[in-house]
Amino acid sequence: MKRAFVKALVLDKVSNTPVVLLGIENTKKILPIWIGACEASVMAIAIEKVPFDRPLTHDLIVTLVNELSLKIERFVIHSIRDNVFYAKIVLRDLVVSEQEAAEGMNPFIEIDARPSDCIILSLKTGAPLYVTNEIIATEAITFEDLGESENEEEFKKFIENLDISEFKKLLNDNPEDFTNFEGGGSEQDNDNQDDDNFEDYDG
C-alpha cells in the first residue's frame, strides 16, 4: 500500500467528464479516476481552499467526526469491481483507551466510501490517502522512460484530451456553479471511458 496525493484535476474532453489524477508517492505512476461533475466541483473548491461562510457537506462530516470523539486515521482505495473503484475511511474511536485496545477491544471503525469523498476529506483534514498495491499494479499509468520518443508520443496521447484550464476558469468565475460539466457520477477505472487512450499503459 502506498500513499497517494492529488496531482491534477482535469477534464476529459472526449467524454466531457472530470478526471482526478492521483500521484503515487515515490513512484512515476499516476492513477486516473473518472468522477462526477458535482464531486469534481467540491474537490476543486477543496484544492483551491475557497472559503465559504457556512460549512459544506464534507466540512460537516469532519465536525461530526470530531464531536463524536473519533479521529480519521486514513483513507484507502482498496479494490475495483465491474470497473468501479471502492474505498474506505478508517476511523479510530478515541473513547477506547490504549489499555482496552491492548486487551482486545478494536478501536478502529471502517466505513465504505467513494474515492472522491475520501480524496476531498483527505484534502480538508490532511489525513493520509493510500492506494493498495493491487490497484497500483493493475490500474495506474507508468511514465518511466519519457526520454524515449515512443513514450513521449504516448504521453502526449494521454494528456491531449485532459484540460485543467476549464476547472480553473469555472472556479475563478463562479465556484458555486459547475453546471457546465456533464457526465455520470460513477467513479470508474481508466478502461471504462476511452480504452484507446490507455491501451499501452497497463502499469
Image: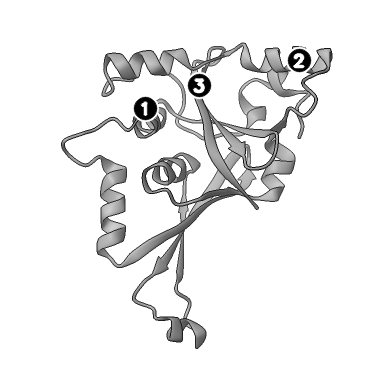
Residue 199, compared with residue 60, is above or below; it is above
Looking at the image, which is closer to me, 194 or 133? 133
Looking at the image, which is closer to me, 146 or 90? 146
Q: Quadrant of residue 29?
A: top right
Circle 1 is placed at which residue position? 41
Give the crowd class for mark 3: few <14, some 14-19, many >=20 residues within 10 Å. many
N-terminal of the pair, mark 1 or mark 2, is: 1
Circle 2 is placed at which residue position? 152
User: Judging from the image, what secondary structure is the residue with disc 1 in?
Assistant: helix
Q: Picture coordinates of residue 190 (x, y %)?
A: 64, 29
Name the colour scheme: one colour
Q: Picture coordinates of residue 39 (x, y %)?
A: 40, 32
Mark yes or no: residue 127 visible.
yes
Amino acid type at mark 2: Glu
Amino acid type at mark 3: Val
N-terminal of the pair, mark 3 or mark 1, is: 3
Mark 3 to mark 1: distance in Å? 11 Å
Q: Picture coordinates of residue 86 (x, y %)?
A: 55, 47
User: Judging from the image, what secondary structure is the residue with disc 2 in?
Assistant: helix
Give the crowd class for mark 1: few <14, some 14-19, many >=20 residues within 10 Å. many
Residue 67, compared with residue 14, is above or below; it is below
Q: Nearer the viewer, mark 2 or mark 3?
A: 2
Identify the disc placed on residue 10: 3
Mark 1 to mark 2: distance in Å? 31 Å
Q: Picture coordinates of residue 63 (x, y %)?
A: 26, 54
Residue, x 31% and y 52% (percent of image)? 62
Mark 2 to mark 3: distance in Å? 20 Å
Residue 160, compared with residue 81, is above or below; it is above
Q: Quadrant of residue 41?
A: top left
